[in-house]
Image: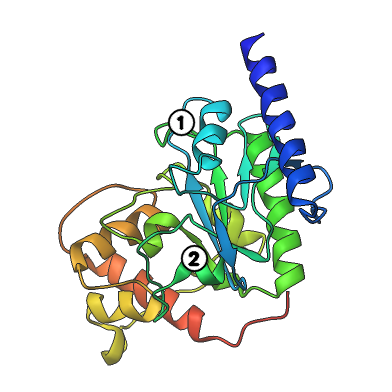
Amino acid sequence: MISRLLHCVFLGFACALLAGCGGFPVSPEGNAILVPSPNHNARRPNFVIIHDTGSGDVERALRTLTDPAREVSSHYLIGRDGTLYQLVDENRRAWHAGASYWGGNSDINSASIGIELDNTGAEPYSEAQILTLLDLLWGLKTRYRIPSSNFLGHGDVAPGRKVDPSRYFPWQRLATEGFGLWCRQQATTLLPDLSDPVLALQAIGYDVANPEAALAAFRRHFLGIDTRGEANDAERQLMQCLALEKRRKPSPP
């Protein structure tokens, strides 16, 4: 009962904002529940960054993402049951990535769509949630011609500071659908310019100012593990494969 009341409050808040602002654009995702957040600037998307809310319920996440005092937002939020909420117009700059970096870009907020998945970070993602996410990603990729390799996690663009989405996130499944970098065929020998793990991670796109953090983010994304220690030969070969995949001419979305 409380959950339904909170849901109604949020919908009322959305309607009030729509009336006051007089022009929150109709979402291209027609099934999204509009819950506008005031925390955004103008921007142009070329990346998609996926996050965990770290929350136990979607109402709490909505309160955080629409609170002016918190100064944090995302374009979309997907509940555990697959419900899609839009908080910020896709053409506006949401405040979701913070201090971040990928492939030479140090202002990810200005160039990305942020998607929050309601998840504590210590639990599997529901099938309903992933199916909604895949539908949303397809629309974003089509609308903005976002390269496949530019679908990333918060932990990828902020290694050492963020670790979401967690090791439970199905990156390989997304890559199979065309959303994210993945290794298709590993070479048997290492190329000289990619034999150093730091150089290979940098070629993939990671900020290697903290090599240990970059390696941890790589392992979480591409191996689904949270471990420490130096890169082994198999990991170095995987890094090279991913770097070479990124160098390929992107196929049209």
Measuring from the top left, give residue 111's x and y in whole percent.
Answer: 54, 72
Q: Nearer the viewer, residue 152 or 29?
A: 29
Q: Is residue 24 above or below residue 81?
A: below
Q: Nearer the viewer, residue 238 or 163?
A: 163
Question: Quarter of the image holding residue 216?
Answer: bottom left
User: Can residue 197 be seen at all in this image of the molecule?
Assistant: yes
Residue 55's tag is: 1
Query: How was this image coloured?
Result: rainbow
Question: Quarter of the image holding residue 211?
Answer: bottom left
Residue 129's tag is: none
Q: Is residue 129 left or right of residue 95?
A: right
> Label 2: which residue?
109
**Residue type at numbered disc 2:** Asn
The earlier-in-sequence mark between 2 and 1 is: 1
Question: Quarter of the image holding residue 154?
Answer: bottom left
**Residue type at numbered disc 1:** Ser
Q: Nearer the viewer, residue 252 or 105?
A: 105
